[in-house]
Image (cartoon, rainbow, N blue to C red):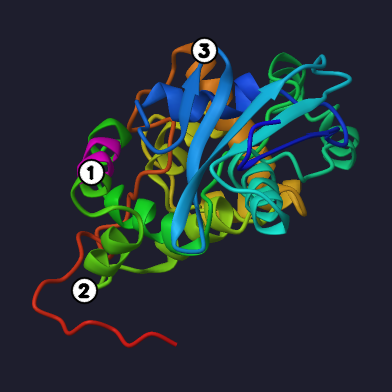
């Protein structure tokens, strides 16, 4: 093994599909989380440098095995960074079996669970990264939001972009819910004010010809506790697969004018 590399294999619990999980990144041209013919790759911070984490699926969806390689670092820190990518970014740390058993017969999601078997929550490396993404996607489609993030990364890096965005305010309930879902991988979060939820999913689930209220969708989602995050991810992927969604609808985009765009002219928040 070349110097400065770490390689290992993991076997996710339950069905797992790297291709289906990472499709969210590929769909919008994400330049941070890269999907290619070899699998998935992204840079991660390790100390004062960065290392490349690359993940490839070797086993089947039913019997998954993931091959992980870290280039540019070694030791416990490199492995810990790779394991964080596995758990937070590509969702391989979640045991999907209880969710599959609980919702296999669900009249709204059962077919999608079977069609998209192995799909997990595609998230962010950390909470601040998720907050950055949530702020950028407020009231814009994700294709545009990802292009803004790419420009930020190119201009500032990771940490510097976060510092720059922390000058602005723009965190409401929707933003916090997206950060919990994408940044911390919480399994029972349901951003009921999301445009895709109150409009496209309400049309599919409730037969509405106009958007539902956030309260209606929050109450409706109670049937999927304690797996509301996974239920939402499968529902959105089902929309994308059926062609019923657009880049605005099939991914988290705020439908709440109260959150809007970050306010200008506010002082930088102090760090905890």
Span of residues in magenta? 146-151
In the structure shown, which secondary structural element does the residue marked by tag 1 occupy? helix
* Residue 58 location, quadrant: top right
Q: Residue lying at the far front in this picture: please name it.
A: 3
Q: Nearer the viewer, residue 194 or 26?
A: 26
Q: Residues within 10 Å of mark 3 (few under 14, many from 20)?
A: few
Residue 107 vs residue 210: left or right?
Answer: right
Give the label, 2 or 1, closer to the camera.
Answer: 1
**Residue to which mark 2 is pinned:** 167
Q: Is residue 203 visible?
A: no
**Residue to which mark 1 is pinned:** 154
Q: Residues within 10 Å of mark 2 (few under 14, many from 20)?
A: some
In the structure shown, which secondary structural element does the residue marked by tag 2 occupy? loop
Q: Nearer the viewer, residue 52 or 60?
A: 52
Quadrant of image for the C terminus: bottom left
Q: Residue lying at the far left in this picture: please name it.
A: 265
Residue 220 vs residue 215: left or right?
Answer: right
The residue shown at (28%, 51%) is 136
């Amino acid at each position: 093994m070349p110097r400065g590399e770490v390689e290992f294999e993991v076997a996710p619990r339950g069905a797992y599909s790297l291709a289906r999980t990472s499709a969210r990144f590929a769909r919008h041209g994400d330049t941070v989380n890269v999907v290619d013919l070899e699998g998935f790759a992204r840079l991660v911070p390790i100390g004062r440098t960065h290392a490349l984490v690359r993940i490839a699926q070797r086993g089947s969806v039913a019997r998954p095995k993931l091959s992980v390689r870290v280039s540019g670092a070694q030791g416990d820190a490199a492995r810990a960074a790779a394991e964080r990518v596995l758990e937070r970014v590509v969702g391989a740390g979640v045991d999907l079996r209880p969710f599959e058993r609980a919702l296999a017969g669900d009249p709204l999601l059962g077919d999608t669970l079977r069609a998209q078997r192995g799909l997990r929550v595609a998230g962010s490396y950390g909470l601040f990264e998720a907050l950055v993404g949530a702020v950028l996607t407020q009231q814009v489609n994700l294709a545009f939001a990802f292009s803004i993030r790419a420009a930020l990364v190119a201009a500032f890096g990771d940490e510097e972009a976060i510092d720059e965005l922390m000058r602005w305010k723009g965190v409401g309930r929707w933003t916090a819910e997206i950060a919990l879902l994408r940044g911390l991988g919480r399994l029972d979060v349901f951003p009921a004010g999301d445009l895709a939820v109150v409009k496209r999913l309400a049309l599919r689930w409730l037969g509405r010809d106009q958007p539902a209220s956030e309260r209606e969708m929050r109450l409706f989602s109670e049937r999927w506790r304690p797996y509301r995050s996974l239920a939402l991810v499968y529902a959105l992927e089902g929309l994308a697969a059926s062609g019923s969604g657009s880049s605005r609808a099939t991914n988290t985009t705020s439908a709440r004018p109260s959150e809007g765009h970050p306010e200008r002219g506010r002082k930088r928040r102090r760090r905890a």
